[in-house]
Image: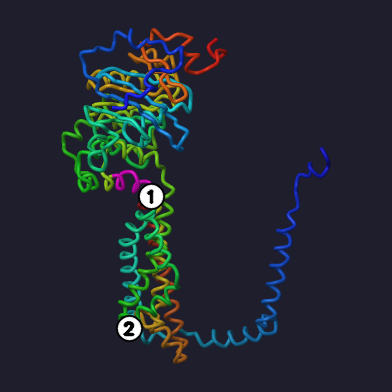
Amino acid sequence: MSAAARRAFVPNWWARAAWVAFALYVLYAASQLEFTPARFLAGIEHGAKFVARLFPPDLSRLALLAKGMAESLQIAVLASVLGVLISAPLALAAARNLMPAWATWPARAVMVLCRSFHPVIVAILFVKAVGFGALAGILALTVASVGFLGKLMTEAIEEISLKQVEAVRATGAPFASLVTYAVLPQVFSRLVGFVSYETDANLRNSTMVGIVGAGGIGGTLFAAFQRFDYDFVCTIVLTIIALIMAGEVLTVRVKRVFRA
Amino acid sequence: MTTGAPAAPAASAAVAASAADPRRSTAEAPALRIRGLVKAYVPGTPVLRGIDLDFAPRGITAIIGPSGTGKSTLIRCINRLVEPTAGEILFEGQDLTRLRGAALRLARRHIGMVFQEYNLVERLTVMENLLCGRLGYVTPLDAWLRRYPPRDVERAFELLDTVGLGPHAHARADSLSGGQRQRVGIARAVMQEPRLLLADEPTSSLDPKTSVEIMALVAALSEKHGFPVIINIHNVALAKRFAGRIVGMTGGRVVYDGAPEAITDAHLQTIYGGEDWLH
């Protein structure tokens, strides 16, 4: 056998060329956008002034803050509940291992459509369609939830053991019982994880859709920015951080309950 | 009826043992009658090449044969987990191959099945797995809410005691050993009040001692509840010990059909090929 054929590691020249090209592009992009140390230092100086104006936080408008936060929380919870209710049957319809192609393709198309745009873009569409306020926010985040929960749930269902499904099918069980006895037990703990993750995402996004007029604390935050009330901005930002952290603690607890 | 040519066992060594079999009483109408059964997963290359078999309403029939010869396919065609390509399967006078939807589910209720890898729903409890056998009888809503008739629950507890798993009713199925799981699998099938039990290599994943115990359990339940059993099995000794009739298959055809005592090394050579492994 020749020496060349016995080489343990064969160089992949195409991959090497691709890496070099990628590195060159990163340098090119940085030069195009004036991403230079000088510009960065100028930015830091400006940032320092901004941070200084954030403190101390303004605690004089707590009622306004509470109203906005409560609305954001409600938007997040309602959007998550609606998202689960819509995406669960959709995911079942989209699972290729259980459903024929005529059911999976439309279901998948709906999910892709829901994931096509950022929640803020969808929120703008709904503000135009149903007017300013929380309804637009709820609908926008529901669409986002259906997109992501649907995809994750579909993948979970497609990974189940079909042996268990086969056994339950052999008993003469109707399809609905097949789903609750052979499919649901196999995916349930993962679903709890997905839903808590999506609720977490909805909580964050619900503080943002207000910027485009779809209800919640985002509107208040945006107004404070525009009036240069940076101390009130600080209060709002700190409250949002506290809310997300509380949500994190809660989801960990919920997951622990369902894993047991 | 498609009493096709493949009916006659093709191989010369396929002795007409069936004619001499004293176990096959002519008085009883068969519980299951298979005629001209063909299954081709890929068109043109059939796995089953025309199977004709009758099964009496009692007793254990063991199907032996090399891997990949269509034993599992044959069993799965009976309860339509696999769609037959051609032929008839008459169960209590009804052609199973023509059933669809609700009619198929009603027929499946009466055909229990035991699997090589148990196929329990791992995350459900033993009791829930047993009650899976009743899913064909209760509405989906009642099943979901775990509202079973008291009679079913009582029966499940009795069966659990019979298979020796009484204390494990609330254990999750994935916490059991292989032998215990197969006992749950058998109990689940018997919960259906089957009029036919199919078993696909029920002992192949188990140790020799447990295998014998499982076969004895199947035999006892078959005797007690009076349902016939069709069992795919690799272990010829086990087949001879527990079955009243042995069907040997090779290449998608039946090449032996008769009493266990009548099976000879020559038959086994026809079924499995070669001879070195016999000695």
Quick check: B209 above or below B37? above
Horizontal side of B58 relative to B75 (left or right) equals left
- Badge 2 crowding class, 10 Å Cα cut-off, few under 14, some 14 to 19, many 20 or more, is some
The disc label shown at residue A187, or none = 1
In the picture, measured across the screen, residue A234 lies left or right of residue B60, that is right
Q: Which residues are magenta?
A: A178-186
* Residue at position x 35%, y 26% in the image: B36
The N terminus of chain A - image quarter: top right
- Secondary structure that dominates the magenta span: helix
* Residue in the foreground of this view, choosing between B2 and B40: B2
Colour scheme used in the picture? Answer: rainbow
A106 and A13: which one is in front? A106
Q: Vertical placement of A236 versus B225: above or below?
A: below
Look at the numbered disc 1 and give the secondary structure of its residue: helix
Percent across and percent down for residue A36 are 69, 81
Confirm whether circles 2 and 1 share one chain.
yes
The earlier-in-sequence mark between 2 and 1 is 2
Label 2 is found on which chain of the structure?
A: A
A179 in the magenta segment: yes
Quadrant in which residue A21 is drawn: bottom right
Q: Amino acid at mark 1?
A: Val
Q: Position of residue A154 (x, y in %)?
A: 40, 55
Q: Residue furthest bottom?
A: A227
Within-10-Å neighbours for mark 1: few <14, some 14–19, many 20+: some
At 31% from the left and 22% from the top, the residue drawn is B229
What is the three-letter code of the residue carrying label 2? Phe
Q: Chain of mark 1?
A: A
Q: Is residue B170 visible?
A: yes
Q: Of residues A165 and A236, which is closer to you in this image?
A: A165
Q: Which label was assigned to residue A132? A: 2
